[in-house]
Structures are given as C-alpha cells and as structure tokens.
Image (cartoon, rainbow, N blue to C red):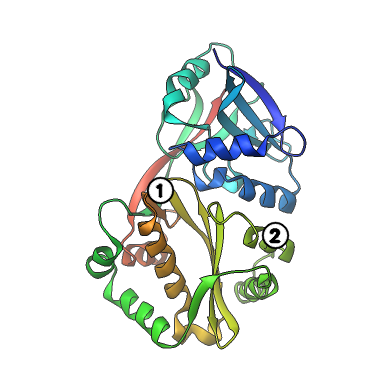
Amino acid sequence: MLKACLVSFDSDLDRANYLSVFSLAENATPFHSLDWNQAISKLIKTKFLYLQLTLDSIVVAILPLHKKNNKLYYSSGIWGCYGGFFFEEKFRDHVVQWLQNKIPFLPYPILLSDYYCDNLYRYKIKNKKYRTWTIDCFENNYDFFYKKTINSKIRNQIRKCEKSGVVIRPANNKDGASVFELYNNFCVEKNIEKIYNVVFFNSLINAQKNEVSCVVAELDGVIIGCAFFLKSKRQTFYWQSYFNRNYSVNNPISGILAHAIEESFSNASCVEFNFGAIPYGLDSLEFFKKNWGAKSRDYDYSLVFI
C-alpha cells in the first residue's frame, strides 16, 4: 500500500530520489525537471511542495505543486505548463489504486495538464482541451525527416546559417549577460514587460544538460541568437528563443532549432520534439510550426481533486 507525504523543496526533498524517478518515468514531462522547478521558484518567489508516494519506504511517484497566487487551488506545472504525477510504469497500478481512494488527500483541487493522457484522475471539476505542435522523433532518422518533411524555405534558412559561418554551441557560464541582452532587446522591440532576469538565465544555463539546455548562435565572437530547451526522458520542449535582428540574414534561430531537433532524433529515448502550444486562430505561428514538420496534438487541462 502506498503512503503519501508532502515535502518542501528547500528542506525535505531528496534530490537523488527525485532525479531517479524523473529519469525513469515514461510520463514525466520537461516541466517536471527539478532544475527548471528550482530556477522558476526563485524567479517568481513561490514555494514548491512535492506530494510523494512511497512503497516500502521507496519513493515511486511524485507530484510537484505550488500555490496558485492566493487562490484556493494548487497548480502542478508553472504558468499553465504540463504537470501531474510522474512514475515508473511498473508502479502504475499502485498509483491508480491510491488515486481512486474515496477521500481526497489534499483539501484544495489541483490545476494540471494530463499531457500523456493517463486518465489517472477521477475527481475532475472541469476539463479543457489544449493543442500543441510536435515532431515525431521515433519513426524516422533525422536525414530522412530533414529532406522529406521540413519545408524547403526552412532548409534554405538552415543552409544560409551554416554557410555564413555561424557557430551553434551549448551556452556556458560566461554567456548569461549576452543571453539576457538578447532577451532585453526582445522585450523593448515587442513593448512587453520583462519577467526574467540575468540570474534566472544563468541558473538555466548552469542546469543539468539532460534537464535544461541553452544553445547559442555565435558569429565572429558575438552571440546573435539563443534558445532554451527543456527535457525529459521522452521529450524535448522548445521553450524560448531570442535573436539580434541585425543578423536576421544569418538565420540564427533556424540553425539552433535544426541542431536541437537533430539532437532529439539522436537520443534513443526521445520520442518527440515539442514546439509548444499556441492559442487557436494564430495562423502565423501555426504555419511556422507546420513548416518545421510539426503536427498538432491535443491534451487535457483539468482541475482535479487528489
């Protein structure tokens, strides 16, 4: 029989246990990454809790939580991103049995997205469909995908990036200021509020590369573009990117995306590259993702009792 307990990130959470479950869980998403949770919790100054289910004193399932502002519900997954329990598949029946208990464990409902459609949660208050765009990395190799699926205009952009001498590489701990400058200029151009700071970007750059990666495009010693990717066992998620518009002709983001997608194809356990959700009706973004060969995929977003 599973036992449940709530632990806090700062004091009680066993990082090694968490990473062990995260690395083995088929239904873990990139937003379950511990380094992502740690970076984002410092940025928005929210306290994370983790509901852990144990079997014979061994942690077998974990649900990350944080209080949604002052509202009377928890959220699993920051800013509307994927959340919910994750666990190794062999413990599924144990988790389902625990969740089907008649008395909810927590006093408030939890907002979460059932991205892998586990249908674990019985006590749904409301349910909404969201749509994201993904590339299937499991069926074909990258060369076949590149030639047969990516739009010819995108392939031309990738070639221009390569021929112009742009170097695509992982960011290092010296790149934080340059990445932040790209982000700052992006906010000025778009006239939007700056949410992130250089400390946040540095924490992502220095995260475990199998959880979070920042890739930069560099030309003649100048960083002209960057992108962040979040990772789990089965998925790479394209989170954010910024570039210097003075170097648009060099197509730095196309070069970075091609690099990241190829890397996802080479990872035997990665089955999809996720471009992320877009609101219905934004045709330009939908067109962009289709040109990269992405296909739409629906998933559930629910308020549930646990």
- Residue 304, given in percent of the width and then of the height, sits at 54, 27
Q: Amino acid at mark 2?
A: Phe
Secondary structure beneath label 1: strand
In this view, 294 is above or below 288: above
Figure quadrant of residue 80: top right
**Camera-side residue: 79 or 128?**
79
In this view, 97 is above or below 71: above
Mark 1 neighbour class, 10 Å CA radius: few under 14, some 14 to 19, many 20 or more: some
Figure quadrant of residue 299: top left
> Does the image show residue 76?
no
> Does the image show residue 158?
yes
Q: Amino acid at mark 1?
A: Arg
Q: In this image, 70 relative to 53: left or right?
A: right
Q: In this image, 23 relative to 173: left or right?
A: left
Q: In this image, 269 relative to 237: left or right?
A: left
Earlier sequence position, callout 2 versus callout 1 = 1
In this view, 54 is above or below 111: above
Name the residue located 38 percent from the left edge and 67 percent from the top edge.
288
Name the residue located 28 percent from the left edge and 71 percent from the top edge.
151
**Camera-side residue: 111 or 158?**
158
Figure quadrant of residue 2: top right
Looking at the rendered image, the quarter that the C terminus falls into is: top right
Q: What residue is disc 1 on?
A: 131
Q: What residue is disc 2 on?
A: 200
